[in-house]
Image (cartoon, grey):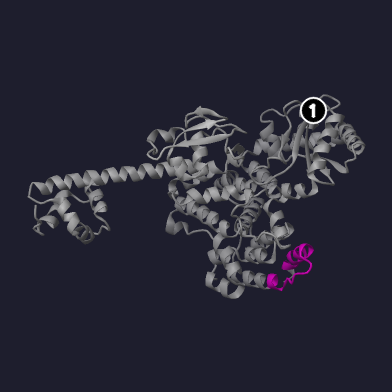
Amino acid sequence: MDAVEPLVAAFRAAHPASDPAELRRAYEVAERMHRGQMRKSGNPYITHPLAVATILAGLGMDRTCLVAALLHDTVEDTAYTLGEVRVDFGDEVAVIVDGVTKLDGARWGKETAEAETFRKIVLAAAADLRVLIIKLADRLHNLRTLGAQPPHKRERIARATLDLLIPFADRLGLHVLKREMDDLAFATLDPDAFTETQAKVAEVLPRVEAELGPAAEMMRAALAEHGVRAKVELRPRHLYSVHRTLPGDLDGLRTSEVIRFLVLVDGSEQDCYVALGAVHAALHPITGRVKDYIAIPRFNLYRALHTVLIGPEGDMLDVMIRTRQMHEVAEYGVIAHIRQGDKGEAPVGEFAGRRDLAWLARLLAWQSDAPSATFLDGLRTDLAEGNMPVFTPEGMIVPLPPRSTALDYAYALDPETGEHSIGALINGRLAPLSAEVRLGNVVEVLTAPDACPGPDWLSFARTAQARVHIQRFLDAQATDEAALTGREALRKALATQGIDLLTAETAGDSLAIARSLGHSTPESLYLAIASGTLPLPTALPHFTTRHLPS
């Protein structure tokens, strides 16, 4: 039991009034069920769920979440059943464990299982966000121990992390996890660039205080003069951030390219604007580089003021200004809200109407219509970085990825609006559905009752939500047309034998024949005739033997 004590200590540090007995009991069950199983690293398997739970305890997650983390692989990898989890630890833990349990690749097929597992996680996260948080902690620990895997598997895991799991972390605002996951995936996928970036940043860091300290002091003095109580910190970018910002040759890397200034304000959001004025008074700002994420928060409710200043030596200095409450959300995202939930605010699983989880509502809106083969591509597109705010005429924010069109905007409002759209007013000017919308645009969709999607819409629809709904409509339309083709072929063949198909349909004979041939409706029968899966000569005798009148 000594192995579980660091977890218990981390849990007690965040929840001193809570009883850890349930954690110890969950550890005993997990250790017993995983006994004899080993990781690729050679360590006992129990070290993995224990590490995942410890990561989550460090984030301040609740006891139920930690119990589920300890048990998260038992149903998948041992004889322990979901029913036993429910009996031993309750419905709440069972729902979370079920949500993070992967589907069987042997039964579903590897690619289908991966797509459907992510679909399952999205659906489970709608019921309880802790499912997704456990999945992220699980992947973080797997990345930390990735060296024990064969090269091809290391690359596959790192690529999936970069494409799907890290964007999920970003959507949830879990930047405390995202930064480490970024760097670990970067080290696997591009080890040469990682090593070079690491070495160049290590060369620069010892010079930070000498080169950027004077600018920090000027900001501190200006803040004090303006009566703002604030702390100015010099925060290094993580390695992947440096690499993405400065790809290529890093010779001559400057301290200002590695460091960002963080101004932590002891006060209200209004004090942040005063702080912005103070730092602008201390150092010259670059025109057009102020971003107000307080007035218009990012999709994950990240709130701060960003500005770029010219330093004493002519360097461009990135500055972020936040209150301490904003800083907690910036680091811990939805977990900060879950902690507030522990204090009697919004429940963990409640996401309806929350602006920071609008992206999850959009995923839920289209995921059920996406086949497994296209679901992951749609998910990658929907989770892509850089969503921008677009506004309705009433002032509601509609977040969309860059290069989205008026058609994407229409579907983001509502699939029915998208389906009947014919054009848009962008900032009051008439525009086609193919027109790109830009950050801050005010967009009004024009609709017509008889309008419907056409195949050309797919050429300028960019979001997964729009593309999935358009494709579903086109597929249904093609199915209807094929069924009509099959019906017409059957009608003509029956007419040559003096049988009227419409009479057969009215009498219910077509339905009876369809069902006798394994089809639920006449339309399904006609579709089978059109596709050739039911040859017309095979179908005809079923009608003629009934001696239907003409």
Toward which corner of the image does residue 287 lie, by quadrant?
top right
Q: Is residue 73 magenta?
A: no
Residue at x 71% of width, y 63% of height: 344
Q: Nearer the viewer, residue 121 or 46?
A: 121
Q: Is residue 538 among the parts visible in the rendering?
A: no
Q: Is residue 154 among the parts visible in the rendering?
A: yes
Residue 212 in picture, x, y percent from top left: 85, 33
77 left or right of 345 in image: left
Q: For numbered disc 1, what is the local secondary structure?
A: loop
Dot 1 crowding, Cα within 10 Å, few <14, some 14–19, many 20+: many
Residue under pointer 1: 285
Toward which corner of the image does residue 450 lie, by quadrant?
top left
Toward which corner of the image does residue 54 lie, by quadrant?
bottom right
Is the residue 189 above or below the residue 124 in the image? above
Specify the quadrant that holds the N terminus. Answer: bottom right
Residue at x 52% of width, y 38% of height: 409
Residue at x 59% of width, y 51% of height: 149
59 left or right of 362 in image: right
Amino acid beneath label 1: Pro
Is the residue 407 above or below the residue 120 in the image? above
Residue 363 in picture, x, y percent from top left: 53, 49
Instruction: Tally the marks.
Output: 1
> Which residue is at the far bottom?
87
Predominant SS along the magenta part: helix
Highlighted range, magenta? 3-24
Residue 332 in picture, x, y percent from top left: 71, 51
Q: Is residue 4 magenta?
A: yes
